[in-house]
Amino acid sequence: MQILGLIVIGIVIGVVARLLKPGRQSISWLMTIGLGIAGALIGGIIASLIGTGGIWELNVLGTIVGIIAAIILIGIAEGTMGRKKV
């Protein structure tokens, strides 16, 4: 059940990160969701290392860090995708 929660919050984090990142993104929505899930996992790990909760717990700090991580991951994915197209 916790993995399902991670997937759901990852989808939300991916969508929010994509909306907050300025400009048009050249990656698919499926990749955005995957990167959002990765961002949620990173946010959970960092929040647990700081001591504000476990990896699987939904908390404000983990969500904020997850959104920032997802924005960075989306930027990296755009950079690598853009290079392949040229």
Image (cartoon, rainbow, N blue to C red):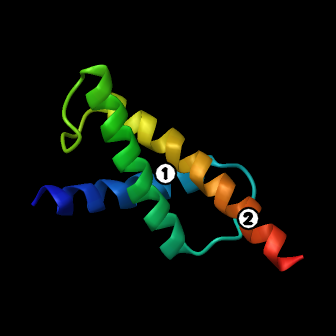
Helix, strand or loop at mark 2: helix
Residue 85 visible within the image: yes
Residue 65 shown left or right of residue 48 in the figure: right
* Amino acid at pointer 1: Val
Q: Horizontal and vertical percent for residue 66? A: 43, 42
Residue 63 shown left or right of residue 79 in the figure: left
Helix, strand or loop at mark 1: helix
* Nearer to the camera, 84 or 39: 84
Residue at (49%, 51%) from the top-left corner? 16
Residue 57 shown left or right of residue 43 in the figure: left
Q: Residue 62 is drawn in which quadrant?
A: top left
Q: Horizontal and vertical percent for residue 46? A: 36, 32
Residue 24 visible within the image: no
Total labels drawn: 2
- Distance from the alpha carbon under mark 2 to that under mark 1: 21 Å
Mark closer to the observer (2, 1): 2
Q: Residue 83 is drawn in which quadrant?
A: bottom right
Query: Who comes first in sequence, dot 2 or dot 1?
Result: 1
* Amino acid at pointer 2: Thr
Q: Residues within 10 Å of mark 1 (few under 14, many from 20)?
A: some
Q: Residues within 10 Å of mark 2 (few under 14, many from 20)?
A: few
* Nearer to the camera, 71 or 19: 71
Q: Residue furthest top?
A: 51
Placement of the C terminus among the 4 image quadrants:
bottom right
CB within 8 Å, label 2 to label 1: no
- As displayed, is residue 71 above or below residue 68? below
- As displayed, is residue 86 above or below residue 19? below
Q: Horizontal and vertical percent for residue 15? A: 48, 58
Residue at label 1? 16
Residue at label 2? 80
Residue at (24%, 21%) from the top-left corner? 51
